[in-house]
Amino acid sequence: MTVGQAPWPFADGQQVAGPFTILTVCTGNICRSPLSEGLLRMVLAGLPVVVHSAGASAMVGHSMTEPNRVIAAGLGVTDADVHVARQLTLEQLRGGRSRARTVSRAPSRGGRVVAAGESPHVHAA
């Protein structure tokens, strides 16, 4: 399968085209979110998934903390040393066209695709 071009089956057999995007977020984008980004990227390798991370109050330009780089290396993440912290943007939070595009590819999954601003568990700043 070529990532992002071939259909990807859900567990129920429904085929949808990728790629999908996962955004992990923490406060500074130097510890939790880049670690989860690296782990997700590693575990989902070969699937039509793009993984990014950002920080709500990012320490823009900084690398991942040393303790988290050690943890990442211990778990097999190979790209932790090249992480550069990025600021979360309003467009990323709103979901932009991503939700509509995702739902159009898998209409039966529409109820499971939630942009952060739509979730009752996410509060606006």
Image: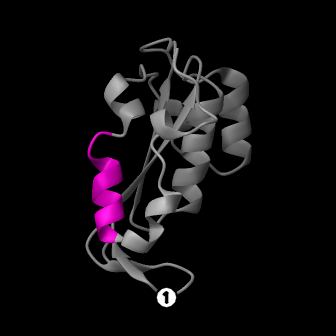
Q: Which quadrant: the N terminus?
A: bottom left
The residue tagged 1 is 13
Q: Residue at x 56, y 44 (%)?
A: 38
Q: Residue at x 69, y 29 (%)?
A: 68
Q: Is residue 19 something one can see in this rendering?
A: no
| Residue 100 within the magenta-colored segment of the rendering | yes
Frontmost residue, 68 versus 114? 114
Give the vertical position of 62 relative to 100 (above or below): above
Q: Is residue 112 left or right of residue 101?
A: right
| Residue 20 image position (x, y, % from top left) | 39, 58
| Residue 55 image position (x, y, % from top left) | 51, 22
Q: Amino acid at mark 1?
A: Gly
Q: Residue at x 42, y 22 (%)?
A: 86
Frontmost residue, 86 versus 120? 120
| Residue 119 image position (x, y, % from top left) | 55, 39
Magenta segment boundaries in residue numbering: 96-105
* Quarter of the view holding residue 12: bottom right
